[in-house]
């Protein structure tokens, strides 16, 4: 994918506009975007408290259903209403930072011995998706870094996110996908935009 820093900054500014408009019940101003933003892409928008860096909302799209710009706006608006938290209020806007993860195409990890899956995952580079029947869970590449997880724990926690027990990744009927993401985030609310650790 290879997003440039300027594109990363723009994608975060776009998400910030979506968050601000949603909490203030305003329409989003027109926004010129490069052609690359018109290509379909999955993306997640994460909101964190500042300076505590506690999760305040995280919603996104795994599949490339919409053009990137639309995906980011939809995810930003939805992240304001993450069902795990109260809806974001306008008075919180200067107390949260915005982070955008632009997803690359997931690839299924196939191994003969399920225990060897831990050798296929690079913590800090890979995000994970687990699927089994109606159960599905995703954790972004930056999550295990934030919690200091190893690959084994990362697999288990992704299963828990999907509503399964932590050892279900060992079952061959559970599909495991890895993906990479380009991550950009505000250093502080409305502040400088930096590239994240996962590439």
Image (tube, grey):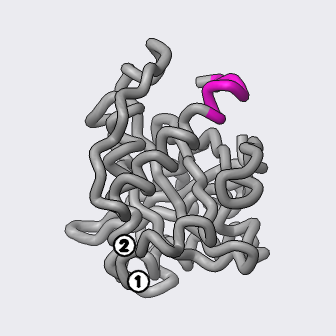
Residue 29, image quadrant? top left
Q: Main secondary structure of the magenta part?
A: helix
Locate residue 81 relative to residue 88 in the image: left or right.
left
Residue at the disc numbered 2: 82
Q: Which quadrant is the C terminus positioned in?
A: top right
Whether 192 is drawn above or below 22: the answer is above
**Total number of numbered labels?**
2
Q: Residue 14 location, x and y as percent?
A: 48, 39
The reply to whether residue 120 is visible in this rendering is no
User: Furthest residue to the top?
Assistant: 35
| Residue 53, picture quadrant | bottom right
Q: Is residue 120 above or below residue 59?
A: above
Q: Which numbered disc covers residue 187?
A: none
Q: Residue at x 65, y 45 (%)?
A: 183
Q: Depth check: 112 or 147 in front?
A: 147
State left or right for residue 151 relative to residue 106: right
Neighbourhood count class around disc 1 (C-alpha, 10 Å): few under 14, some 14–19, many 20 upward:
few
Q: Which mark is residue 85?
A: 1
Residue 107 in percent (x, y) is at: 48, 41
Looking at the image, which residue is at 54% across and 52% down? 111
Q: CA distance from mark 2 to mark 1?
A: 6 Å
| Residue occupying the point 46% across, 52% down | 44
Residue 131, image x and y in percent? 34, 63
The magenta span reads 2-9
Report x, y in % for residue 141: 63, 56
Q: In this picture, is 86 found above or below 114?
A: below
Q: Is residue 125 left or right of residue 106?
A: right
Give yes or no for contact between labels 2 and 1 (Cβ–Cβ under 8 Å): yes
């Amino acid at each position: 994918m290879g997003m440039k820093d300027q594109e990363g900054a723009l994608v975060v500014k776009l998400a910030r506009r979506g968050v601000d408009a949603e909490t203030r019940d305003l329409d989003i101003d027109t926004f010129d975007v490069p052609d690359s933003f018109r290509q379909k892409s999955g993306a997640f928008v994460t909101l964190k408290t500042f300076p505590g860096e506690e999760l305040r909302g995280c919603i996104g799209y795994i599949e490339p259903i919409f053009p990137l710009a639309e995906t980011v706006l939809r995810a930003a608006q939805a992240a304001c209403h993450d069902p795990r938290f109260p809806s974001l209020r306008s008075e919180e806007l200067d107390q949260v930072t915005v982070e955008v993860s632009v997803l690359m195409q997931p690839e299924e990890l196939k191994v003969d011995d399920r225990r060897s899956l831990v050798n296929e995952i690079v913590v800090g580079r890979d995000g994970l998706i687990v699927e089994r029947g109606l159960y599905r869970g995703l954790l972004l590449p930056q999550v295990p870094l934030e919690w200091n997880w190893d690959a084994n724990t990362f697999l288990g926690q992704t299963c828990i996110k999907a509503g399964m027990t932590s050892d279900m990744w060992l079952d061959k009927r559970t599909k495991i996908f890895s993906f990479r993401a380009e991550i950009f985030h505000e250093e502080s609310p409305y502040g400088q935009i930096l590239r994240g650790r996962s590439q």
